[in-house]
Amino acid sequence: MDVRQELVKLAESKPELAYLVRESLEAVDRSGTLLEIEGARLAILGKKGRVSEIFKHLSEVPAEDRPEIGRVANMLRRYVEAELARKSEELKESDAEAMQKRQALDVTLPGRRAPVGRKHLLTQVIEEVTSIFISLGYWIESGPEAELDYYNFEALNTPAYHPSRSLLDTFYIMKNEPDKNSPDDVLLRTHTSPVQVRVMESRTPPLYVVSPGKAYRREAIDATHTAMFYQVEGFAVDRGIHMGHLKGTLEVVARKLFGSERRVRFRPDFFPFTEPSAEVDVSCHVCEGKGCALCKGIGWLEILGCGMIDPNVFEYVGYDPEEYTGFAFGMGIERIAMLKYGIEDIRLFYENDVRFLRQF
Ligand code: DAH
């Protein structure tokens, strides 16, 4: 039995002491600060404290009980003294520890650096491409991603039977008739070309415009296809614009993007909204044109489609094709980024794995 238990037991056998002892023990237990410890010491061991009180009233109890009561009172005093001393020692120790810790804090050390974020690679490439065009005197325009059939297809001279209109390629938001295309159907734009029509409709030439943004297609996702991707559209409309301006402009841009050692070629192609149309290829950076997995053995990577704006498009926006001519182009941003940095899977752009993104 420890001192405390013994004390309680003894006090219980003397009902006149039980209350004083229990109250004293509780006062000791409650004291958690140096100030409270000092308070408890005064209340129990002080001149007018509990212990003195017991001794003061000793003469009032029967003589045969006095030794026992005196023993309990002395025991209580010793216990309280020891317990309070132990408690205050403990507090002083933890105080000293805290002090030491405070001294261990070197305020002259440099602070911890918060991790700094960065722009997503696609944002970086968009900014690089658009800034090249801005340096050539172009300005930026944008258009809605939820677009009318009229701007995405119709006014871009894309007739109703054109294969790119098939439900397989386009996400429709609102279709007026299930099996028929209508100019006021609402869809997710399949390219950024509708911005051409919107800008031409609301402005008059000269126009030198770039328009970066998202486009959507119903694609099966693989290493080179995603259902949402970025394009940068560009076009120039002015008096006397001809294909030499288009070639010269794109050659400058391709070399600024990929370095002067890259070769560029123009292949005839077809787009409904340009005539003539061309596909522009850049020599493959992985194999230097010898043929590899990235370029599928061709040695060239297609970076954009372009052409001279079809007079039919000018008719839609009310421009006189005899007065104005223009060129247009559209490039895939992911494709440009893949080429520039040797990235072989388009899905990496959208997985948001910081170990990938941090590299750029
Ligand atoms: N809109 C075309 C596409 O998404 C790219 C394109 C080709 C844009 C020729 C043009 C252009 O402005 O003249 O594949």
Image (spheres, rainbow, N blue to C red):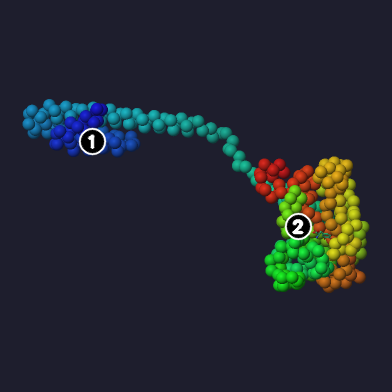
Q: Residue at x 39, y 29 (%)?
A: 93
Disc 2: which residue: 212
The kind of secondary structure element at disc 2 is strand
Q: What is the crowding at mark 2: few (fewer than 14 residues within 10 Å), some, or many (at least 20)?
A: many
**Mark 2 within 8 Å of ligand 1, using the beta carbon:** no
Report whether residue 254 is seen: no
Q: Quick check: marks 2 and 1 in contact, CB under 8 Å?
A: no
Q: Nearer the viewer, residue 217 or 97?
A: 217
Image side of residue 282 versus residue 73, left or right: right
Q: In x, y percent, where is residue 45?
A: 22, 32
Q: Nearer the viewer, residue 199 or 34?
A: 199
Q: In x, y percent, where is residue 81?
A: 26, 29
Residue 164 tag number: none
The kind of secondary structure element at disc 1 is helix
Q: Residue at x 69, y 66 (%)?
A: 173
Image side of residue 142 versus residue 3, left or right: right
Please identify the quarter of the rendering in which residue 204 is found. Answer: bottom right
**Mark 1 within 8 Å of ligand 1, using the beta carbon:** no
Q: Is residue 128 above or below residue 209?
A: above
Q: Residue at x 77, y 56 (%)?
A: 231
Residue 24 tag number: 1
Residue at mark 2 to residue at mark 1: CA–CA distance: 81 Å
Q: Residue at x 73, y 59 (%)?
A: 218
